[in-house]
Structure formats: structure tokens, C-alpha cells
């Protein structure tokens, strides 16, 4: 089992920045690939970014490329999502997820473990 706890969400003006964190406990964090997804009200859960266990492979959704950066610190059992140039359409609950591989990194059902989510609201 892996337990995931997100933090860092909040209310920000358009153009602002936030840094989300996801702290993991339980099994060896460094063995897992990690990802961020988001879900806006009434919409499906969408892929945002993913990172392999050793940070060698990183993927982003087209909608966040150049604005968001995913990173991880295996010594701290934490994955981060730095979000810059935020837009109102980035408003959603952001979830982190863990899986043993990144074969289908953008599909929510491929992930074994999920956090409870953190709300990000971008106001115009």
C-alpha cells in the first residue's frame, strides 16, 4: 500500500503560481512512477503530468506544457507540481497518483494509488 497526501492548493489570481506537493508513505516511494491529474466540476479526470521513478521520463498534457513542471525528491518521498502562468481553466481538484510503470501514463485507471486531492482555484 502507498498513501498519498496532496497539499499546496488554494486561490490565486490568473497569471499567478502555485506549488503542489504530494507526500507518500508506505511502500518504497522510489519504486513508483508518479503523476498529477485534475478534475473540474462535471468533467472527467484529466492527465496533467507524469514522472518516472528516476525522473528520466517526464510527460505533460499539451494544455500545461511550458507552464507546469513536475519533479520528485525520492529522499523526501515527495512529488511536486510547480504551476506558473495559471489560467482560470486550470481550476480543478488536483490529484496525485502512483503506479509501478508509465506504460499508459495518461489513463487514470492505470494508477493503483490516489491521494484525496487538493483544490486549485484560479480567479480572473
Image: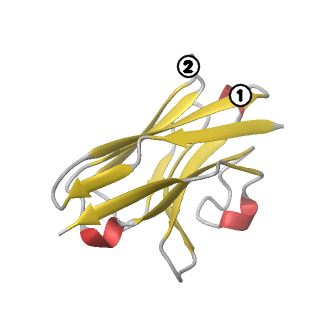
Badge 1 is on which residue?
25
Image coordinates for residue 51, horizontal then vertical, percent: 53, 44
Badge 2 is on which residue?
76
Q: Secondary structure at mark 1?
A: strand
Q: Is residue 59 visible?
A: yes
Image coordinates for residue 73, horizontal then vertical, percent: 51, 24
Q: Is residue 54 above or below residue 112?
A: above
- In the rendered image, the quadrant that contains the N terminus is top right
Q: Secondary structure at mark 2?
A: loop
- In the rendered image, the quadrant that contains the C terminus is bottom left
**Label 1: how many residues lie within 10 Å, few (<14), some (14-19) or many (20+)?**
few
Image coordinates for residue 48, horizontal then vertical, percent: 46, 60
Residue drawn at x 66%, y 62% as measured from the top left: 104
Which residue appears farthest toward the bottom when viewing the image?
A: 42
Residue drawn at x 60%, y 44% as measured from the top left: 34
Asked if the residue at tag 2 contacts the one at tag 1, i.e. Cβ–Cβ closer than 8 Å, the answer is no
Q: How is the image coloured?
A: secondary structure
The image quarter containing residue 100 is top right
Q: Is residue 106 above or below residue 56?
A: below
The image quarter containing residue 106 is bottom right
The numbered dot on residue 97 is none
Question: Residue 29 vs residue 40: left or right?
Answer: right
Q: Is residue 63 visible?
A: no
**Nearer to me, 77 or 14:** 14
The image quarter containing residue 27 is top right
Q: CA distance from mark 1 to mark 2?
A: 10 Å
Which residue appears farthest toward the right when viewing the image?
A: 1
**Nearer to me, 2 or 65:** 2
**Nearer to me, 113 or 117:** 117
Residue drawn at x 54%, y 42% as measured from the top left: 6
Amino acid at each position: 500500500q502507498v498513501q498519498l497526501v496532496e497539499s499546496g492548493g488554494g486561490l490565486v489570481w490568473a497569471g499567478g503560481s502555485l506549488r503542489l506537493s504530494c507526500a507518500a508513505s508506505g511502500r518504497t516511494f522510489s519504486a513508483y512512477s508518479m503523476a498529477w491529474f485534475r478534475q473540474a466540476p462535471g468533467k472527467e479526470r484529466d492527465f496533467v503530468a507524469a514522472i518516472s521513478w528516476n525522473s528520466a521520463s517526464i510527460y505533460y498534457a499539451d494544455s500545461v506544457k511550458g507552464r507546469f513542471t513536475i519533479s520528485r525528491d525520492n529522499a523526501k518521498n515527495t512529488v511536486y507540481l510547480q504551476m506558473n502562468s495559471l489560467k482560470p481553466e486550470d481550476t480543478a481538484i488536483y490529484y496525485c497518483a502512483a503506479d509501478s510503470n508509465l506504460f499508459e501514463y495518461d489513463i487514470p485507471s492505470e494508477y493503483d494509488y490516489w491521494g484525496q486531492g487538493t483544490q486549485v482555484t484560479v480567479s480572473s
